[in-house]
Image (cartoon, rainbow, N blue to C red):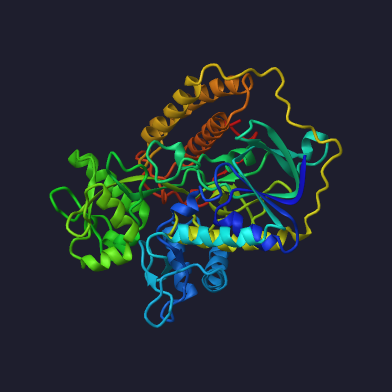
Amino acid sequence: MIETDYLVIGSGLAGLTFALRASAHGRVIVATKRAPADGNTSWAQGGVAGALDPDDGVAAHVEDTLRVGDGLCHREVVEICAREGPEHILWFADELGVPFDRDAAGHLELGREGGHTARRIVHAKDTTGWAIQEALLKRVAARGERITLLPDHMAIDLLTTAKYGGPNAVFGAYLLDQRTGEVVTVVARAVVLATGGSGKVYLYTSNPDVATGDGVAMAYRVGARIANMEFFQFHPTVLYHPAAKSFLISEALRGEGGILRLRDGTAFMPRYHEMKDLAPRDIVSRAIDAEMKRTGDDHVDLDMTHLPGDFLVERFPNIHRRCLELGIDMRTQPIPVVPAAHYSCGGVAVDERGRSTVKNLYAIGEVSMTGLHGACRLASNSLLEAMVFGARAADDVRDVQNPHPAGVAPWYAGEAGSPDDAVVVSHNWDEIRRLMWNYVGIVRTDRRLERAARRIELIRSEIRDYYWNVTITGDLVELRNIALVADLIIESARRRPESRGLHFNLDHPDHDPRMMRDTLVTRGDGPVV
């Protein structure tokens, strides 16, 4: 058994921000199921939103966020992030040394993305997330006496005092050492979920393979409230190419003047929104989906050819390089793109300090639902949220007291045998992702949701039977989690008989004023178990 003050599960921007700040008053273990850089943060291209331009302002950032959030943002949280964000961005730039792009005078260069009415996106070319991740890992390494990294350690389940006869409070987790197969028990005064998103629940996604919804699943199993899982953002522009796995074409390209066109060259976004190609992501994704269905084409094109070639290479070196490797020169050819699952606006419901509804369990970053994003996330507000709430949780956790019960039970495998039929994992994994894409995707109907609910119930039953009869593996843990997250998305979508933000149901195409509230799901209050 390993003891520490704070156990952080996940090593992206939110988790490492928390670790650095909390290490000032406690020992921190950061467990991550693969290498510390293998997460959504490293893949983030666009940047961080913050009102840093003298001609911009916090109020404008707030209003843009509220408008895109389509009635469900928590205003107080939006104001906190917009107000505190610039200070955090400057700390990352000046103290942590993140090489954000600057102009000739040394000022931070600001870009614009969909839904924003001003230039307020701080970026490091088109690899902003990687630049942030690299700087964080260097600083964490320098704090080795206070922060311990546990790579290749996958969280299986959280430990709660409820199982020892006390009130429900989290005091640690079981971690699977994927190199040895050993299950390690870690106890802590507080556990911080920073596990990122769950894009792998869908067949087509911009997310890396680690995004399997682990944090949401673990939190739900110990009774934490989960909110707004029906609002899954589909990024409008993921590269369409058989050799390009999950390669994102940043929204910043449209922010710099990119135009979405049909295969025949027709610009179609003016028909869908007054902001044209800079419309919010939900509108752009639905527009592309509708045009692809109408024309029968496999993709649409993002045209950058009217912009100076030198500018494109300088501003988007990573995207230019990857496209060129696949035979696409964005300076002279349009980029073929399709929508793909990108970001979960729902997650573990938390307060303004990152506290979940279960004592001593925190959630920060994409795994959480703070209220910032509402029914649709404004571009580049995600890294902002991770910065702000990583710091807020670290400040709040200082006084947490939760002595673990005496005689904590180690992991017990019982009579479980070796996995003898790996096809159970691969088949169910594939079926879940396909049914979610087909029935619970960009456009939904009541009938599709009912079909999905029936199928996921059968799949989860099969997984449960298999899970409790074989030795634990990383693949099996992820399958169990992704099946539960799929169930939560389906159930949340069924509870919202309207269309709002990212949730579009053809049977209920309009807003329902009665539904201007969060969708809350807790273990024991409905069909999901």
Quadrant (top left/top right/bottom left/bottom right) for the N terminus: top right
Outermost residue on the left side: it is: 264
**Vertical side of 510 occupied by 393: above or below:** below
Outermost residue on the right side: it is: 406
Residue 228 in view: yes
Q: Residue at coordinates 82% horizontally, 39% vertically from top-left?
A: 166
Position of residue 519 measured from the top left corner of the image (x, y, whole percent): 54, 45
- Left or right, 380 with respect to 417, comes to left
Name the one closer to the observer, 113 or 406: 406
**Vertical side of 161 occupied by 124: above or below:** below
Position of residue 437 measured from the top left corner of the image (x, y, whole percent): 38, 35
- Using the rendered view, name the quadrant where residue 92 is placed: bottom right
**Vertical side of 366 occupied by 276: above or below:** below
Q: Residue at coordinates 18% horizontally, 54% vertically from top-left?
A: 333
- Left or right, 525 with respect to 102, comes to right
Quadrant (top left/top right/bottom left/bottom right) for the C terminus: top right
Position of residue 405 measured from the top left corner of the image (x, y, whole percent): 84, 40
Name the one closer to the observer, 406 or 124: 124
Residue 279 in view: no
Name the one closer to the observer, 347 or 145: 145
- Left or right, 393 with respect to 308, comes to right
Count how many numbered circles sit on residues in the image: 0
- Left or right, 398 with respect to 272, comes to right
Position of residue 82 measured from the top left corner of the image (x, y, whole percent): 52, 69
Q: Residue at coordinates 70% horizontally, 63% vertically from top-left?
A: 395
Q: Residue at coordinates 59% horizontally, 50% vertically from top-left?
A: 194
